[in-house]
Amino acid sequence: MNAVSLPPETTITDVPAYMQGLGRAARAASREVAEAESGRKNAALMAIADVIVSQRHSLAEANARDIEAGRARGLDAAMLDRLTLNDARIDAMAEGCRQVASLPDPVGVITDLAFRPSGIQVGRMRVPLGVIGIIYESRPNVTIDAAALCLKSGNATILRGGSEALHSNRALAEIIQAGLGAAGLPRSAVQIVDTTDRAAVGELLRMQEYVDVIVPRGGKGLIERVSRESRVPVIKHLDGVCHVYIDKRADADKAVAIAVNAKTQRYGTCNTMETLLIHSERAAEILPRLRAAYDKCSVELRGCERTLAILPGIHTATEADWYEEYLAPVLAIRVVDSLVAAMDHINTYGSQHTDSIVTEDWTTARRFLRAVDSSSVMINASTRFADGFEYGLGAEIGISTDKLHARGPVGLEGLTTQKFVVLGDGHVRGG
Amino acid sequence: MNAVSLPPETTITDVPAYMQGLGRAARAASREVAEAESGRKNAALMAIADVIVSQRHSLAEANARDIEAGRARGLDAAMLDRLTLNDARIDAMAEGCRQVASLPDPVGVITDLAFRPSGIQVGRMRVPLGVIGIIYESRPNVTIDAAALCLKSGNATILRGGSEALHSNRALAEIIQAGLGAAGLPRSAVQIVDTTDRAAVGELLRMQEYVDVIVPRGGKGLIERVSRESRVPVIKHLDGVCHVYIDKRADADKAVAIAVNAKTQRYGTCNTMETLLIHSERAAEILPRLRAAYDKCSVELRGCERTLAILPGIHTATEADWYEEYLAPVLAIRVVDSLVAAMDHINTYGSQHTDSIVTEDWTTARRFLRAVDSSSVMINASTRFADGFEYGLGAEIGISTDKLHARGPVGLEGLTTQKFVVLGDGHVRGG
């Protein structure tokens, strides 16, 4: 494999024309990728993994330019860390490509093929969406993750990363295109938006004829802007205000284990518990045990009045706390008098992401499972399980909080759609 | 069952407040309907059918007021016909409710439930979308069709019919609500927008907290307005520019039968063929046979130059013809030199609705089936089969030309979504 040479930096003056060009090329490539056999797509993914490894030095060089510019611009330590491609992260990107290659190909799978009374056979074939636009912030490894998932699911991709990662993303795009070329797939199956001009995003969101779906990945501000402005359908993730409800008939040990894991296993993830609900008959017994566990992790507790009566000295939760996605070692706690009160709280304040009940009562569990309207509903399990790998999807492009199309963790299947296929032998419709 | 009395006509002055009230009531009702057992929903559907029949005279009276007003406003004969509820149509509405009652209930079906390495069980449960807004034009029987499908799929519904059908729709809403009440379901599970103020539509399209999806049914102008303005996701049907491609290796008799059926079985439907593509090696043999058949039905033909050379005297097709959805006895015909040329034409001019190939060649059929990116792709069958009843969905709320969520005929399943369910025994996440 030859060394990947970075193209010279260019200034794009006519952003709409540039974006239309990307769109046309993506649409044309999408037809080829949609028809590509699994073996060819997998070969491309394995080639990309190889080039990532063989080009790790030029990749690190490009990344260093971003880091240097980021320091000069005064990015904080957390942002610089997310921007950094160290050896471990470069290896992880290559490994990610190999893992996606090993997943089953969803494209072309025909289900429910059956004869109808008229004599035709009708079924559904899973097919790519077409062209997927990904808009994301500083982490450059998203470039590889997103490109790999979109390619495996038979889609062409237009990637718009953060301006602070442009050099890294250009280097990664070259690597991806080298891998595509090596496998005989069109290089324009994966393109980056090679300008930091913000008008490019607006164009991408309006190219309905060239882009089939937009997936924004990043902070709430980005996602809200994309949702508001896009004329193209969006698969998006908004808030993760997740609840654990400890029921009257909860097993206390399970309740403590789940409530501690759901809050403390990781703080910054969308499937972390933000509000704990507990039945009034169990609060006096279980809350002190939880406080002891949370104190060890320095989790700040904010409770309703009845919680404060049991855990004196903690902060008082305000109405705003029930809506809050802390993404931090902070937990709101509310005592409720019934399953219905718990479900009312979840319906009122939750974000329909992931909610779990701890109970040994069959009827209560069954009701909660059916009635709670969230993308993941759990019984006696930590909300932290809500993720594509844990669910067996193999990988995920994100977790959708929308109801239509994809709901919950979105894997390869969420990047496809189904068309009807009809097989006949000259059949015509009567009547 | 008591006689349904029509409420007095009211004037709604504060349209936003009125719509918010409908939304709140719908959201509350949606939770009850989502949890309702199939038996209760079916009982409501059967009760609605009974009330339709027993109240046919008051229904006909309300409809007569609309017809009278429509005549006074100068509606044309076709519109007056669509507005009319005669005995046959009233019986058909009742029968439609009974048929929907007999369909399997999609709600609560759990699929793919399997153990994961962590020990949790993960599956997907089919659940209602929540609140569905239907915006439609003059045919009042849509009120019953849409309400029945939404109810069976566990959703609450807000119906906004055409202003010219308001009296009929008010009478139908009373009937539906009587049936809901008789089965112990909340009357606000189905509500109509009881004002002709056009601002009400704008409100409905912006009530994201109360409405989960909008289904517009009507002309292109209505659907484009709804798509443009809606902040709520839309399941929509735009154009049906459907093609039949007669391949080099087509069976001539099948080709003629399919091409005639696809064009002439009904002219005004979205799955009617609008453009016929034919391989150059078969044009001279098959086109004259087709012309003879189309002449019998007075179908106007518009051909490309090569078609005109074989069928002298027909109209010349312009570029605009290839994009046209005639919905009339008019057909565009183009001679192409290959499968690829046919697929290029379909990709360029088609609307991704329904496209069919006539061929006896295995490899050609297989390629067409995979590569054509339309909601229904057919081999040796008439495009007229693209419909929920023919596909075995039992009924349909429309045919979606979107790619996301529901594609093609939308039955009960398209009015639902899936959530993940996770079952554990105190499982927490490690690592």
Image (cartoon, coloured by chain):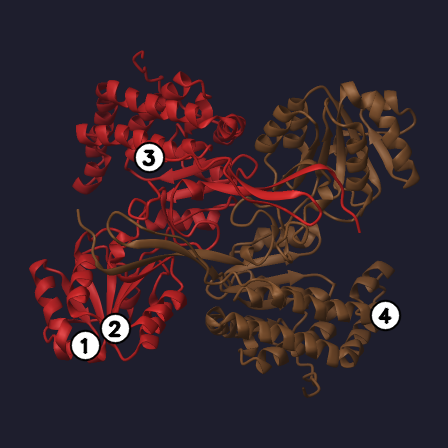
Chain colours: A brown, B red
Q: Earlier in the sequence, mark 3 or mark 1?
A: 3
Horizontal arrangement in the rendering, residue B411 relative to residue B263 (left or right): right
SS category of the residue bearing label 2? loop
Residue found 44% across the figure and 56% down from its top:
A418
Which residue is disc 2 drawn over? Answer: B247
Q: Counting other residues with Cα less than 10 Å from the Cα at mark 1, is it few (<14), some (14-19), or many (20 or more)?
A: some
Q: Residue B294 falls in which quadrant of the image?
A: bottom left
Q: Nearer the viewer, mark 4 or mark 1?
A: 1
Cα–Cα gap, marks 3 and 4: 64 Å
Q: Residue B367 falls in which quadrant of the image?
A: bottom left
**Residue A315 x/y as whole percent:** 87, 30
Asked if labels 4 and 3 touch by Cβ distance under 8 angstroms, the answer is no
Q: Earlier in the sequence, mark 3 or mark 2?
A: 3
Q: Amino acid at mark 3?
A: Asp
**Residue A267 x/y as whole percent:** 80, 46
Which residue is disc 4 drawn over? Answer: A72
Residue at the far bottom: name it. A2
Q: Residue A246 falls in which quadrant of the image?
A: top right
Q: Nearer the viewer, mark 3 or mark 2?
A: 2
**A143 shown above or below B45:** below
Which residue is disc 3 drawn over? Answer: B145
**A50 shown above or below A347:** below
Q: Amino acid at mark 1?
A: Arg
Do discs 2 and 4 belong to a common subunit?
A: no
